[in-house]
Image: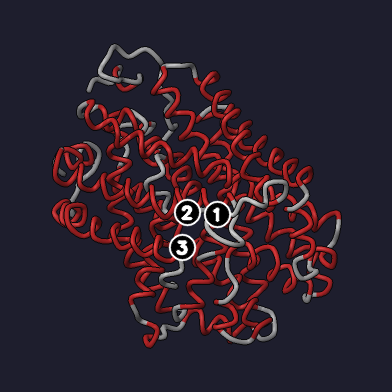
């Protein structure tokens, strides 16, 4: 493909709209890492590490991330760079009969973004709360959290605040908005994570929790450990969301794909590791055992348990609480920006609208759907789609994470591995760097990854309906 052709969107027709570009490799790496680093790193990774033997889980996760995870990352970014398209156009460029794969994939960011912004609103409220309400008011055993999410006006308002920040960054463009935001937030996120980790490790009693977190307990090796680490790897790396295909389409042909995806996986793993180093010792100090730490997960860990632990730190509580939720806010924003950008790119590529018009359309959809899902905690709380106690957010999360994403990843592996053939993307990777592990990558895409995607799909659907517990 000629250089001037790469500056445009192509859909099998004459190119007509200039395509955004990253300013360089570092910008792409930070964007990919920003997409990968999110709430799952901070509230799910530490819980799984506590549940599955600390160091044993860490080792398993790293192995999976740098084999299966990095292989799927490379597939998606190479597919995007080769086709210069977001997901629908990327698959359709190999034939219109494959467009359905892209259409299925494009559903994911449109489902996830609204409810992700709702949770982002919760994080925003807590960051503000440590400045205005104080740690004692927040650490009241869950009353503060329940009161907030069941208040339709307040919860909707903070959702809009979080969305507004996201939309402003995306509106400023790939280079002028997303890149600049990532150049600020990603280093800041890392600095805050390291700072809190050091502070935590200096607290009395933290050493026992840190030792548990870092020391492998091989008695914890089990199928459940594998499924937990596999699921965490898959969701943490922003796979099958349309994001990495979109971001790959903005990458110049001269930039190394292999080095870039390795850096993204590495950054994501470092933040996950630091999250565990922050949370496991703190929770261990408060509850005294790994089992007690493992029992706390998700929103309960983030918005009820940890504020209680921070409050027990006395004079340091306001600072630590604010810095922690500022860290979580950065992680949530970087992911929501990536999700929104994927939505905008999908609409622009599919309709040939301008970026501005595509963004306006996405804003309307995300706000409306977000408002509907948010109402599931208050005015629509009587709707319990997955059983007693479930919410609309639980339904959206189940459909996207447990069903559509594993199916998209499975179909993509089959598509690349058996239909268009791995050499198609291997040649794309080799345009900018050697690909010494091409044969290993081919085996993973054709044989190993599809099996693991089926495991994720079956396991997490079964878990949702209470058939198994991981």
Q: Position of residue 83 (x, y in %)?
A: 28, 29
Q: Quadrant of residue 218?
A: bottom left
Q: Are marks 1 and 2 in contact (CB under 8 Å)?
A: yes
Is 109 rendered above or below residue 361? Answer: below
Upstream in sequence: badge 1 or badge 3:
1
Instruction: Give me the residue at 50% from left, 41% from top.
Output: 111
Secondary structure under the numbered disc 1 in the rendered image: helix
> Where is residue 229 shown, x and y percent of the image?
39, 68
The answer to whether marks 3 and 2 mark residues whose Cβ atoms lie closer than 8 Å is: yes
Left or right of residue 149: residue 182? left
Q: Nearer the viewer, residue 87 or 373?
A: 373
Marker disc for residue 398: 2
Q: Is residue 424 left or right of residue 59?
A: left
Q: Residue at x 75, y 66 (%)?
A: 142
The kind of secondary structure element at disc 2 is helix
For residue 150, say whether it is visible: yes
Q: Earlier in the sequence, mark 3 or mark 2?
A: 2
The residue pinned by badge 3 equals: 464
| Up-down relation of residue 280 to residue 459 (above or below) | below
Quote the CA–CA distance across marks 1 and 3.
10 Å
The residue that label 1 is drawn on is 394
**Distance Cα–Cα, label 3 vs label 2:** 8 Å
Colour scheme employed for the rendering of this structure: secondary structure
């Amino acid at each position: 493909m000629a250089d001037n052709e790469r500056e445009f969107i192509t859909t099998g027709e004459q190119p007509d709209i200039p395509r955004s570009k990253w300013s360089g490799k570092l910008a792409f790496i930070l964007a990919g890492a920003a997409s990968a680093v999110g709430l799952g790193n901070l509230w799910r990774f530490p819980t799984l590490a506590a549940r599955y033997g600390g160091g044993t889980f860490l080792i398993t996760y790293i192995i999976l991330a740098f084999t299966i995870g990095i292989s799927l990352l490379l597939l998606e970014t190479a597919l995007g760079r080769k086709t210069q398209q977001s997901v629908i156009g990327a698959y359709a460029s190999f034939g219109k009969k494959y467009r359905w794969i892209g259409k299925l994939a494009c559903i994911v960011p449109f489902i996830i973004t609204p409810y992700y912004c709702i949770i982002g609103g919760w994080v925003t409220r807590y960051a503000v709360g440590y400045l205005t309400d104080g740690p004692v008011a927040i650490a009241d055993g869950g009353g503060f959290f329940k009161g907030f999410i069941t208040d339709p006006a307040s919860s909707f308002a903070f959702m809009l605040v979080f969305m507004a920040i996201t939309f402003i960054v995306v509106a400023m463009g790939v280079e002028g908005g997303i890149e600049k935001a990532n150049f600020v937030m990603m280093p800041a996120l890392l600095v805050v994570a390291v700072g809190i980790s050091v502070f935590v490790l200096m607290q009395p009693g933290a050493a026992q929790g840190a030792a548990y977190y870092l020391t492998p307990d091989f008695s914890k090796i089990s199928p459940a450990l594998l499924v937990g680490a596999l699921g965490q790897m898959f969701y943490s790396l922003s796979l099958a969301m349309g994001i990495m295909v979109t971001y790959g389409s903005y990458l110049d042909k001269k930039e190394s794909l292999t080095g870039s995806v390795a850096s993204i996986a590495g950054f994501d793993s470092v933040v996950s590791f630091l999250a565990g180093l922050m949370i496991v010792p703190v929770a261990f100090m408060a509850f005294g055992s790994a089992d007690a730490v493992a029992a706390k997960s998700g929103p309960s860990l983030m918005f009820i348990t940890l504020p209680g632990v921070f409050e027990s730190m006395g004079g340091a509580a306001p600072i630590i609480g604010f810095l922690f939720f500022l860290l979580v806010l950065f992680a949530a924003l970087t992911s929501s920006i990536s999700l929104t950008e994927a939505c905008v790119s999908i609409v622009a590529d599919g309709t040939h609208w301008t970026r501005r018009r595509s963004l306006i359309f996405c804003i309307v959809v995300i706000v409306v759907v977000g408002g509907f899902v948010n109402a599931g905690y208050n005015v629509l709380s009587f709707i319990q789609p997955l059983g007693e106690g479930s919410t609309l957010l639980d339904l959206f999360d189940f459909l996207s994470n447990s069903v559509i994403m594993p199916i998209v990843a499975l179909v993509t592996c089959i598509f690349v591995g058996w239909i268009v053939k791995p050499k198609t993307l291997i040649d794309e990777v080799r345009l900018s760097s050697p690909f010494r592990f091409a044969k290993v990558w081919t085996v993973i895409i054709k044989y190993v990854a599809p099996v693991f995607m089926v495991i994720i799909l079956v396991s997490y659907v079964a878990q949702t309906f209470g058939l198994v517990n991981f």
